Image (spheres, helix red, strand yellow):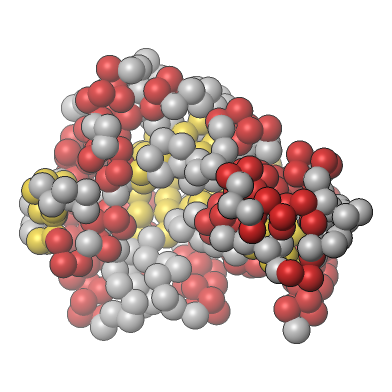
Amino acid sequence: MSFFNLEKTSSASKARAGTLHTAHATIQTPVFMPVGTAGAVKAVSPRDVADTGARLILGNTYHLYLRPGCDLVAQAGGLHRFASWPHAMLTDSGGFQVWSLETLRKLTEKGVEFRSHLDGSKHMFTPESVMEAQRKLGADIFMAFDECTPYPATKDVAVKSLELTQRWHERAVTWLKDHPEMHGYPQYFFGIAQGGMHEELRAKAIEHLIKLDLPGYALGGLSVGEPAEEMYSVADFSTNLMPTNKPRYVMGVGTPANLLELISRGIDMFDCVLPTRAARHGTVFTWNGPFHYKAARHAKELDMPVDPDCSCYCCRNFSRAYLRHIFVSGEILALELATLHSLHFYQDLMRVARQQILDGTFEVWKDQLLRSWMKVEE
C-alpha cells in the first residue's frame, strides 16, 4: 500500500480528497493537525484529542530536543509511547523556531548555532543532527531542516535562503539513506519548498524537491506576515507544479477561512496553534464564525451552548453562561472545555470539507460558509 492515495479532485477547483497510510493511523485528507509542541496538546489529554477525531498531531524537535531530550524519548520507545499517543505523529524540524531566535543564533553553511531560550546553553543544529533527532523521536512523518525565508525578503535574500535550504535537503537525504528506521516502522521524510513570495524561486524549489523524490512536500515561509491573498497566490502557483500523487502541506496555517481557501488551491495538510491558543484566551471557532465566550453579554445565556451545531463534549453539556463563568473565575476547566470545542470544530471542518469534495459540492459549500462568516464579522 502506498503512503498516499489521491481519491478525488474537485472539478471546480484543485481541492483534493485523499488518504495517508502510516504505521499508527490511516489519515483522511484534507487534515488539520493539532499542535503538541512539547509532546502534549495544551490543556487536553491525548484521549480527549483522539475523541475529537484527530489521528495526526504535531510535535516540535527544537522543544523536545531541549527538554526532555531526544535520547530520553528514544529510551521510552519514541514519542508515541512517551506521550501515550497511539495514532500518527509529525515532527517539525525546529527550523522555524531556530529562525525566530534572531538574536540567539548564528547561521552558517554547516547549520545553525543557537542558544537555548530556556537556559542560554549553546547548541548546534545541522541537517544531519536534526534528522537523527527526529529518528529518535520516532514520528511517522518528519520534516527537513530549512531556513525560513522572512517576509518581506528581496529576491537576493530569498535566493541565498533557498539555495542553503536545498543544500541542507541533499545532506539530509544522504544521511537518511545511511540510517534506517529506529523503531521498526516507516518514517516518511517531507521536503520544504522555500523561495519567499517569488514565483520563480518557488518553481526552482519544487523542481529540486521533485528530483529528490520525497514522500511529501511542504510549503514553508508562508503565514509569516504576508497578506492572506499573497499566501493564497503562492500556494496556488506552487501546487500547479507539485506531483499529484504526493501530499502537500502548508505549515503553520491557520484560520478556518485560511484552511478552506488553501484546500481549494490544492493543499492537503495543515497545522496551527491558533485554535488551542485562542481558546485559552477566550475565543473559540464555530460554524457561525469566531465566538468570544468571555464577553459579558454571554453571562446569562443559560440555555445556549457555544455552538448549537456542534456535538462536542462542551456543547453537549455546558451553557455559554457556565463557560464564561468558569473562565472569569480562573478555573482551568474553562481552558480545557474551550480547547476541546475548537479542536472538535477544526476536525469537523476537515471532515465536512472532505465529504463535500467527494460529493462534488466543495466550492459552493465553501463560498456559502465564507460569506456567512464575513457577515458575522461585519
**Residue 43 rendering spot, x and y as whole percentages:** 54, 42
Q: Nearer the viewer, residue 103 or 230?
A: 103
Give left or right: position of 330 versus 159: right
Direction right: furthest residue: 303
Against 25, is 75 above or below? Answer: above
Q: Nearer the viewer, residue 264 or 63?
A: 63
Q: Is residue 179 left or right of residue 317?
A: left
Is residue 244 visible in the rendered structure shown here? no
Q: Identify which residue is drawn at 45% across, 56% down.
A: 251
Pick whichever, 43 or 350, lies toward us: 43
Residue located at (68% from left, 63% from top): 294
> From the viewer's perspective, is residue 260 above or below residue 214?
below
Tally of numbered discs:
0
Res. 98 image quadrant: bottom left
Decide if residue 108 is in sight here: yes
Q: Residue furthest front?
A: 329
Identify whether 24 is placed above or below 90.
above
- Residue under the image location 79 percent in, 63 percent down: 299
Q: Pinpoint residue 378: horizontal percent, then vertical percent.
A: 75, 84
- Using the image, determine if residue 220 lies above or below residue 93: below
User: Residue 241: horizontal and vertical position, in percent?
Assistant: 47, 62
